[in-house]
Image (spheres, rainbow, N blue to C red):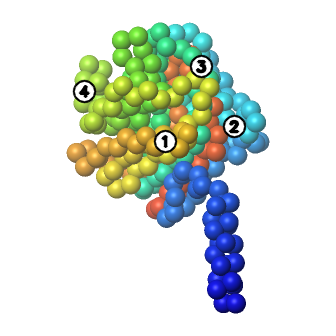
Amino acid sequence: MVQSVVLVLFLVLFAAVKASPQARPGCGSGWRLAFEETGNGAWTDRWFLEGEQASVKYVDEALELRAGPTPLEDESHTVLWTRDVFEGDICVEYDFTRLDANYGYPSVNILYLQATGIGGPDSPVDISASSDRRRVPHMRSYYLFMNTLHISYATTGSKRGNYIAARRYPAESDASFPIDTLIAPLYEDVVLFEPGKTYRIVAEKRGTLLSFVAYRDGKRNEFSWELSVAENVKCGRVGLRQMWTRQSRYSGFRIYVRDGLLESTRVS
């Protein structure tokens, strides 16, 4: 009798474990949700946009960001910034789908983590106060005048593409940007982010470690960088940059913190 009961309990537990869905990759335990994009309401309640040729809209509760249409034209870049500011360790998770199929020229998607201005009248710490200066989102307006971490992915180019890189702004000059902002290692020949396929992204900055993980079809692709060689970025906004012609869908976009969430700052 006892053996029969034990057997029944074992079968019930086995069936429950077998039926339970596999945990969805994400930021995991120990984090506090600080920002969530629900795909409803007005996107301007949570974000502000730089780039006059770009567009943002909700489609099936996902956020679609489309940069301007002209290749190799600075006016066609765009950056979408959170209105909220995040402090301390941070983790960002979202489903990313590339909607464009542009390969013949350089183009990059970038995730900015905790961006602020470098200070002064031309670059106030609160980047929303200088947003009008970036109506044309020249790349140099960011890497020369902002303090932030940068992760580039879904990269293309006829000479150099398929890489994932981390950078630390600001650069000392235009000429030095490629070298003095790069955080080793540079990951090359990364064949991911095919158009029309959805990848689960988890990007985390914890202490002096920065990581970027892309999941698809049960495969985990992790890229990481040690930040101890650079002054740590501690507080700022999260941004999504797309170069000319890039079109992307972001769903399930959430930001988690450990140390806190500062009061959001709004732009008119």
- Using the image as rendered, state which of residue 137 and residue 19 is in the foreground: 19
Q: Is residue 4 above or below residue 18?
A: below
- Amino acid type indicated by mark 4: Ile
- Amino acid type indicated by mark 3: Asp
Q: Are marks 3 and 2 in contact (CB under 8 Å)?
A: no
* Precedes in sequence: disc 2 or disc 4: 2
Q: Which residue is mark 2?
A: 62
Name the spot of residue 165 as percent of width and height, x first: 36, 32
Name the spot of residue 58 as percent of width and height, x first: 73, 34
Residue in the image at 34% along x and 56% along y: 207
- Using the image as rendered, state which of residue 143 and residue 199 is in the foreground: 199
The N terminus, quarter of image: bottom right
* Precedes in sequence: disc 1 or disc 4: 4
Mark sitting on residue 228? none
Mark sitting on residue 219? 1
* Precedes in sequence: disc 1 or disc 2: 2
Residue 117 at least partly seen: no
The C terminus, quarter of image: top right
Q: Which residue is mark 4?
A: 179
The Cα–Cα distance between marks 2 and 4, rounded to whole angstroms, is 36 Å
Q: Secondary structure at mark 4?
A: helix
Q: Secondary structure at mark 2?
A: strand
